[in-house]
Image: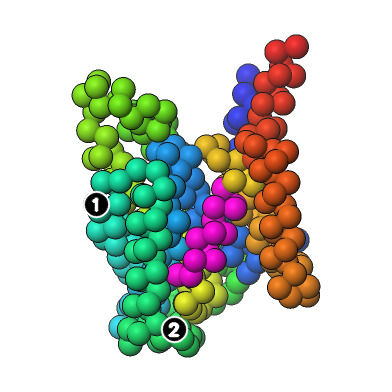
Amino acid sequence: MINQRTLVTALLIVLALVAPLVAYPVFLMTALCFALFACAFNLLLGYAGLMSFGHAMFFGMGGYFFGYVVKTMGLAPEIGLLAGVAGAALLGLVTGALAIRRQGIYFAMITLAFAQMVYFICVQAPFTGGEDGLQGIPRRALLGGLIPIENDRTLYYVVLVIFLFGFGVIQRTIHSPFGQVLKAIRDNEQRAVSLGYEADRYKLLAFVLSAALAGLAGSMKALVLQFATLTDVSAGVSGEVVLMALVGGLGTIFGPVIGAFLIVAMQNYLAFTGEFVLVIQGAIFVVIVMAFRKGLLGELNDWWKRRRAT
């Protein structure tokens, strides 16, 4: 008998395959990029208990590394994606090695300080294009010309495959022994240490993995939109990813995906309101925090468990 999780997963895959036939592919690809970014952040906060206020630096720098490799160096997009992941992971290693020495708000403030430093470097550094950013990043065919991605629909399926790969890595990590140790550290770090686990090492690995996946998401966004700008490394994007994770459901598998699609859809379809869209986002955030403490998917899961128990 097919279980409910398998059925839901199959339904979501079918919807993802037919989505570009009924929706604007660029919107879908942008949402998938932010969904992977939100899932990477959720891995860090929802499962490791580490609150980062500067996660946009990995997302934005992934885009810059991709753009520089593809546009300036003239290399293939797949090399650019690897460069974005590797660069973000290295930045995550340096940041995490210093940040995990502190806990709570002090950890969050260190990540914010690093993010502001990276933002200042991006303003000044010549390889980022300064305030103009990297514009006109070319869409070259993948795998030596085997997969042309000039067409938005073709590129959508490439982005979908990359997203599913990143999502699969996160899901596998969460359900692995490593993920179980992360949850134990999140719930009671002193007890995990007393059982012989090196908490700092596990937290650093989680931080680097989250940074690498955020860099992959940023690289994908640069591939889709063909530019990388200062906005992607700004504090506003760091705040947006927190909002996406909280709205969808922190500590859930699909919650950040739902939150990302909701926030990106609001920004896309409410763009005519100008800056007022930020007020709407703020109001939604307040409602979610007050009425849906576990996020949309978290509350839905609790409701379903209560319904099955009765």
SS under mark 1? helix
SS under mark 2? strand
Query: Around disc 2, counting alpha carbons within 10 Å, would you say few (fewer than 14), some (14 to 19), or many (20 or more)?
Result: many
Provide the residue designation for mark 2.
134
Colour logic = rainbow
The quadrant in which residue 196 appears is: top left
Residue at (69, 65) in percent of width and height: 278
Query: Camera-side residue: 225 or 152?
Result: 225
The answer to which of marks 2 and 1 sits earlier in the sequence is: 1
Residue 134 as seen in the image, left or right of residue 88: right
Q: What residue type is labelled 2?
A: Leu
Which dot, 2 or 1, sits closer to the camera? 1
Locate residue 279, reporting x and y percent.
Answer: 72, 63
Residue at (48, 39) in percent of width and height: 46
Q: Where's the N terminus, which quadrant? A: top right
Provide the residue designation for mark 1.
97
In the depicted structure, whether residue 303 falls above or below residue 261: above
Q: Is residue 253 magenta?
A: no
In the depicted structure, whether residue 125 falls above or below residue 181: below
**Marks 2/1: CA–CA distance:** 30 Å
Dominant secondary structure (helix, strand or loop) of the stretch shown in magenta = helix
Residue 115 as seen in the image, left or right of residue 22: left
Q: Where's the C terminus, which quadrant? A: top right
Locate residue 36, reporting x and y percent.
Answer: 50, 54
Query: Around disc 1, counting alpha carbons within 10 Å, would you say few (fewer than 14), some (14 to 19), or many (20 or more)?
Result: some
The quadrant in which residue 218 appears is: bottom left
Q: Is residue 243 magenta?
A: yes
Q: Which amino acid does label 1 sit on?
A: Ala
Residue at (65, 61) in percent of width and height: 264
The magenta segment is 233-245
